Image (cartoon, rainbow, N blue to C red):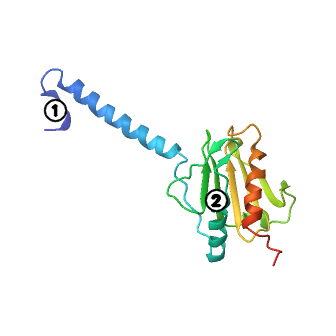
């Protein structure tokens, strides 16, 4: 007997209830998967080398508890190499990331110096911005999602202060 034939012999009204239950479970599973995929709560932490790890731990302790009025709420899994500030959408900092390949190319790039820290500025698809430190002993990357702040660069002064205190320039002894 096929699956279809079994449904044909169910009591009247049983098939619609089972189909409703099945479709409800399927919708919940799909919605849960979609929300997990869309969530920026899961940020894989970078894996810095030993020297970079020590600098990143120091930076983690120096980072502000709030950024532009938004409380710090770190992503999961918890790591001293990532930080985030609650906003809708979130702002995420990663410490100890590889130097972006674009910095290794010989061409003009957009950048800014904020409180003695040089940042590479990249506008990403969808209006997000990524700011990456330049010429520091370990690389720090900040992603500001589109719409998080009126001006995405507003976060740089506070973050630059913490970076300047804890992550020295490659050119200093």
Q: Give residue 5's mark.
A: 1
- Left or right of residue 4: residue 142: right
- Residue 12 in picture, x, y percent from top left: 14, 20
Question: Within 10 angstroms of label 1, few (less than 14), some, or many (20 or more) residues?
Answer: few
Question: Within 10 angstroms of label 2, few (less than 14), some, or many (20 or more) residues?
Answer: many
The residue at the point 23 percent across, 30 percent down is 18
Can residue 4 be seen in the rendering of this structure?
yes
The residue at the point 75 percent across, 44 percent down is 152
- Left or right of residue 102: residue 56: left
C-alpha span from label 2 to label 1: 57 Å
Q: Give residue 69's mark.
A: none
User: In the rendered structure, which disc, 2 or 1, sits on the residue that comes first in sequence?
Assistant: 1
Q: Quadrant of the C terminus?
A: bottom right
Q: Give residue 94's mark.
A: 2
The residue at the point 37 percent across, 36 percent down is 28
- Left or right of residue 27: residue 94: right
């Amino acid at each position: 007997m096929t699956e279809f034939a079994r449904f044909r012999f169910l009591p009247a009204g049983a098939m619609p209830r089972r189909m409703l239950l099945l479709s409800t479970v399927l919708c919940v599973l799909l919605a849960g998967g979609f929300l997990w995929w869309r969530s920026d709560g899961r940020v894989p932490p970078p894996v810095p080398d030993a020297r970079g790890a020590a600098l990143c731990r120091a930076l983690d302790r120096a980072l502000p508890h709030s950024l532009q009025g938004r409380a710090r709420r770190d992503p999961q899994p918890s790591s001293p190499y990532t930080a985030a500030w609650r906003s809708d959408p979130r702002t995420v900092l990663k410490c100890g990331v590889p130097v972006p390949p674009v910095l290794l190319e010989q061409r003009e790039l957009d950048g800014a110096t904020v409180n003695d820290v040089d940042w590479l500025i990249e506008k990403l698809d969808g209006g997000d911005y990524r700011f990456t430190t330049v010429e520091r002993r370990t690389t720090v990357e900040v992603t500001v999602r589109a719409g998080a702040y009126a001006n995405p660069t507003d976060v740089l002064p506070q973050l630059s202060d913490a970076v300047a205190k804890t992550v020295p320039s490659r050119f200093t002894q």
